[in-house]
Amino acid sequence: MGFKYILIFILFFLCLVLPLEPLVRIPKYILMIILTLYCKNLSFFKNKNFFYFICIILFFSCYGYLNSAGDLINNIQVYLIMPFFYSWIILFKDYKVQSIFTFNVVISVILTVLLMYIFQSLDLNHFQLNTIAQTSVRYSYNSITNEFSFPLFNVLPFTLSFIIIYFGKNNWYKGFLISISLLISFYTGRKGVFLGISLVSILIIFENYNIYLKYIILLLFSLFTIIFISMNFSIYDLDYHRFTQYSSLMNMWQENILIGHGLGAHTDLIRNIQKPSSYELFYLSLLNQIGVIGLLFFVDYFNRFVLFRSSNIFVRSVQYGIIAVLISSFTNPYFDRFDFLFLIFIPFILKNDKQKITT
């Protein structure tokens, strides 16, 4: 394996298998810079679609600066500066790079399941890495609620969905992989992960149906879920942190409904010292930062450049993984992580690729 592929393997390993923040953020940055210099390909930055994305980020970054957003530097670093080191994803046109990525996806799922088994079998309730400076990473298991807390759950909705599509060569294999994925996601005790995999599984099962019929089925299932939840729970049944987040974020967003308060904006209620604008209620936090208009821009971007129709198996695997993360982020900030941002550019970079890619 050449030096380039070794670097790519390490980067994917850090992002998909060891997604610890901020412990391994600097190594990720260094690897991305090296790979960007190695590629020497500026076509990624010249594309008008990338320019479209950067313009959105620039506007809301400047707007956040004018509003003195407390978490602006963190968001500029993640959403604006780092995308300029993403030219290395041009390497996804290489079959070896796709294979390395897929291998790390599989390893990530295996490691997640193995850790859950070990923690539950040995009744390891808590393991914290915060003795290391600048880290707040927690591995834990609550034997009362049967809920695990691992950094690996940030990528689990993506990795499980990716595996279903990539290895589901026929309906039997897909059905088997969907069943295993639902079992794993349920076993985590994380409602967001289970919700993401459940809804993506429905999309996969009905993916060959008429697109309108498919989304009607998804809408009906979602409506049934909402009705079930509303009949058994209320907003006051949310845990204390989510309820207070809901109240504070809603109050702040209503001060500027259309364009929010800019990237990095957050309320006085801070969930994470390292990233103050990150909340479990991710979309409400995003709405507070970029408002209704900004959210519509992002929806349009995803629809045109990320979730387009494709017959390529690798692109479709990434797309379904992204969809699962977007769904899971309704309950936790799974998408609000450095590890995921480069993923939204993979379909984009391969969309108009004239090079033949094996499917």
Image (tube, rainbow, N blue to C red):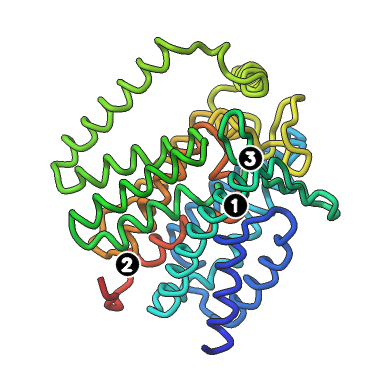
Secondary structure under the numbered disc 3 in the rendered image:
strand
As measured in the structure, the alpha-carbon distance from the residue carrying label 2 to the one carrying label 3 is: 44 Å
Decide which of 113, 95 is in the foreground and name it. 113
Question: Mark 3 is on which residue type?
Answer: Tyr
Task: State which quadrant residue 324 falls in.
Answer: top left
Name the residue rendered at 75%, 58% in the picture.
23
Name the residue rendered at 32%, 55% in the picture.
164
Instruction: Give the residue pinned by disc 3.
Output: 141
Badge 1, how many Cα within 10 Å: few under 14, some, many 20+?
Answer: few
Residue 188 in the image: above or below residue 321: above
> What is the number of callouts on the image?
3
Instruction: Give the residue pinned by disc 2.
Output: 352
Secondary structure under the numbered disc 2 in the rendered image:
loop
Q: Is residue 294 visible?
A: no
- Say whether residue 330 is left or right of residue 173: right
Instruction: Give the residue pinned by disc 1.
Output: 118
Q: Residue furthest front?
A: 122
